[in-house]
Image (cartoon, rainbow, N blue to C red):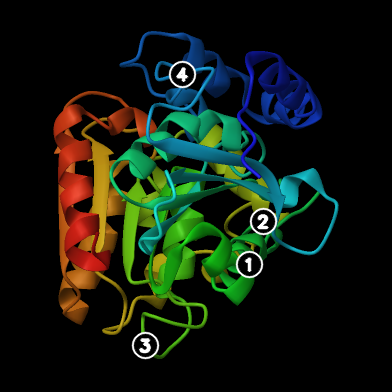
Amino acid sequence: MAAHISPARRRLRLTGRVAAVLTALAIGTAALTSCAATPSAPSAAGAHDAAAEVSQAKPPVGVVVTADVPYAGTSNRQQQLDVCAPTPNGTVHPAVLLIHGGGWVSGDKSTTEAQCEWLAQSGFVTFNIDYRLAPAARYPAGSDDVTAALRFMRLPATTSRFEIDPHRIAAFGGSAGGNLATTLAVSGTGPLTSGDRVSALVDLSGPVDLTSGALTATQKQSLTNYETTYLGCKTLARCPKAAAASPLRAVTSDDPPTFIGQSSADYVPHQQGDALAAALKTAGVPVTVEQIPGAHHSFAVLTPTMKTDITAFLHANIGS
């Protein structure tokens, strides 16, 4: 049964995330403060960059939202998702797994409501997920939740209820969500149309190499703080989990076509996206990189042109 999200309910849901937000403030106050600055200012948590694009109280015409659907067999509110779908008409649609940002320590699916509705308007049934956050749930909890959400999407009961084609699914994430989406996309083997694989990837400002090295040496300390909190390490230099959480190190020739969006002075340095693009090209995987000027981050890089290009990319790779 469809459940539209009212402004009052949104406020209640957001208050339930206060503890996570306080944690983010404790480890990156200066970076989070920048979320309240002008849209061109860099920020630490991708969820905050989408604040300028606030979802309406009711979904737009032609979109049905089903809220707070459990996907992992638990009652944990951080393991629920919202589904934004075109009005049911008996037609089977491709699907998108949408993953919010927030430095792995904050944010929730309410911050990507507008993107969920835009994708539904574009013909994609979109599963907008919450996932467990650090420090209470460190790596690989968030990554495991993304995989659980994909498996939920492919259940016969889900495909029937929401009229989706389980063989045409894309992953789409921003900032920390970009890391999680990319990790999902480059994991596993076999066809991109089944199991734990996806047929396309959209990564906005995702950190793809968390190891101590050239790509993390010059980034802001606040970003490093998010990464070490997520990984449960004191430093990146002494963190065995860092390599496992770095999808750049897992790129292979059977990975899905990828769209990378970023800005020239992104909070997550654009060299991260550039390195991912280079690795994919070397492996023979189709990749598109779109960079806008300025210091926009995560979903804030979504200019009208980029949204049009992403829609075209998704239609080309998972259909309509």
The correct choice, above or below, for 208 with respect to 217 in the image is: below
* Cβ atoms at labels 4 and 2 below 8 Å apart: no
Q: Amino acid at mark 2?
A: Leu
Badge 4 crowding class, 10 Å Cα cut-off, few under 14, some 14 to 19, many 20 or more, is few
Q: Amino acid at mark 4?
A: Val
In front: mark 4 or mark 2? 4
Q: Give SS at disc 4.
A: loop
Mark 4 lies on residue? 54
Badge 3 crowding class, 10 Å Cα cut-off, few under 14, some 14 to 19, many 20 or more, is some
How many labels sit on residues?
Answer: 4
Measure the C-alpha gap from mark 1 to mark 4.
Answer: 35 Å
The correct choice, above or below, for 12 with respect to 144 in the image is: above
In front: mark 3 or mark 1? 3
Q: Is residue 264 visible?
A: yes
Indicate which disc, 3 or 1, sits on the residue closer to the N terminus. 3
Measure the C-alpha gap from mark 4 to mark 3.
Answer: 37 Å
* Cβ atoms at labels 2 and 1 below 8 Å apart: yes
* Cβ atoms at labels 3 and 2 below 8 Å apart: no
Indicate which disc, 2 or 1, sits on the residue closer to the N terminus. 2
Q: In the drawing, does residue 181 fall left or right of residue 82?
A: left
Of all residues, the one furthest to the right in this rendering is: 75
Q: Give SS at disc 3.
A: loop
Q: In the drawing, does residue 1 fall left or right of residue 197?
A: right
Mark 2 lies on residue? 231
Q: In the drawing, does residue 215 fall left or right of residue 145?
A: left
Name the residue at 63% across, 15% down.
7
